[in-house]
Amino acid sequence: MPIRFDAADAHWRVAPLPGFSAAQKDWLTRGGSLTAHLRTLGAVAVRVTREAVALPWADEHAALGLAPRAPVWVREVVLSVDGVPFVAAHSVAPLAASVGVWQATRRLRTRPLAELLYSDSSVARSSLVSRRLTARHPLYRLAAIEIGGVRPHTLVARRSVFERHGAPLMVTECMLPALWARLASSASTPSAYSASPHVHAPQRTHVREHGRPLEHTASRAHGAPRAEQEHLSERDANESGHAPTSDRKEKR
C-alpha cells in the first residue's frame, strides 16, 4: 500500500551514518515491532511519561503534513528491559486523528503501541530513518532523564510514519546507552552452540507475519537473531531508509 507521508528530511536519513556501530545500524533499520525485538533480551515494561495536547517539534510538522503550530496528540513512553530503561519513545498524531482514526492510542495506558499497529492490516509504514541527537533536540532531553551517570554527547534515534485511512502517526524511538551495553555484553558471551564443536545450530526457518514473509520486516543490516524468530513464531507474529515502496505493518 503506497504511503504519502515521508519521515525523512535533511537530518533524518534512510541510510544510517557510517560512524554508527554494527549493532546500531542493525537496530536502527530493523523492521517489525521494536517491543518484540526488545523481548528477545528480557522482560519488557512500558512506562508512560506524558500524554497531552501539544505542538509538533520543529522537525515533525512537515513529515505529518501539518502547519508548524497545528495541535497534535503526544504520547511519550519509556521501554525498559528487566527494569532498565532501553528506549525513550515519542509518538505524535494530528489532534483530529487522535479522536478519530487513531483514537485507540489515547486508551493504551501501559500497553505498547505495537498492539494497535500490528493488529490492523490497513496500517502502512514509511521507510525507517535515523540520525544522531544532540542536547539541542527535545528527544535527547527526554531520553537523558533516563540515563544514569555521564550522559553521552549524542544519542541515536529512528523514526517512521504510520498511515491508517489517510491519517498519519509518527513514532520516534531513541535508543539509550543501556541497550548498547546489553548487546555488547551478550556478544562477548559465547553461545551454547559455539561452546561445543559437536552441537550445530538448527537451520533458520522463515516465519510468516500476518501472512507476509519475515523478509518483509527483517533488518537490512543483519539477519534477525534466532531467539527473535522463535519468539515471533510462538506468538504467531501478533506483534510484530527512502525505500521505493512503503513498508506495511512494520511497527514498534
Image: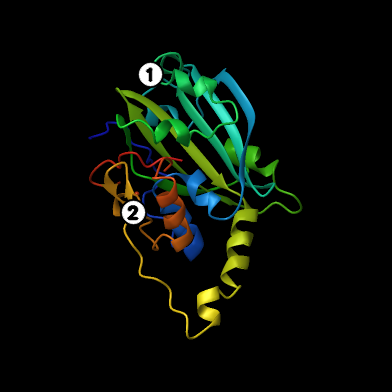
Location of residue 90 in the rendering, given as x and y in whole percent from the top left corner: 54, 34
Horizontally, is 134 left or right of 70 in the view?
right
Above or below residue 133? Residue 224 is below
Above or below residue 81? Residue 124 is above
Horizontally, is 229 left or right of 80 in the view?
left
Horizontally, is 10 left or right of 74 in the view?
left
Viewer-proximal residue, 139 or 246?
246
Q: Is residue 137 visible?
A: no
Of callouts 2 and 1, the N-terminal one:
1
User: Within 10 angstroms of label 1, few (less than 14), some, or many (20 or more) residues?
Assistant: some
Circle 2 or circle 1, nearest the eye: 2
Location of residue 247 in the rendering, given as x and y in whole percent from the top left corner: 30, 42
Location of residue 187 in the rendering, given as x and y in whole percent from the top left corner: 56, 69
Judging from the image, what secondary structure is the residue with disc 2 in? loop
Question: Which amino acid, mark 2?
Answer: Val
User: Within 10 angstroms of label 2, few (less than 14), some, or many (20 or more) residues?
Assistant: some
Horizontally, is 73 left or right of 205 in the view?
right
* Residue 47, image quadrant: top right
Above or below residue 99? Residue 26 is below
What residue lies at 34% left-to-right and 54% top-to-bottom?
207
Location of residue 167 in the rendering, given as x and y in whole percent from the top left corner: 35, 22
The quadrant the N terminus occupies is top left
Judging from the image, what secondary structure is the residue with disc 1 in? loop
Task: Tell which residue pokes out farthest to the right in this image.
Answer: 149
Q: Which residue bears the numbered disc 1? A: 101
The CA distance from mark 2 to mark 1 is: 30 Å
The tag on residue 207 is: 2
Viewer-proximal residue, 169 or 137?
169
Viewer-proximal residue, 229 or 146?
229
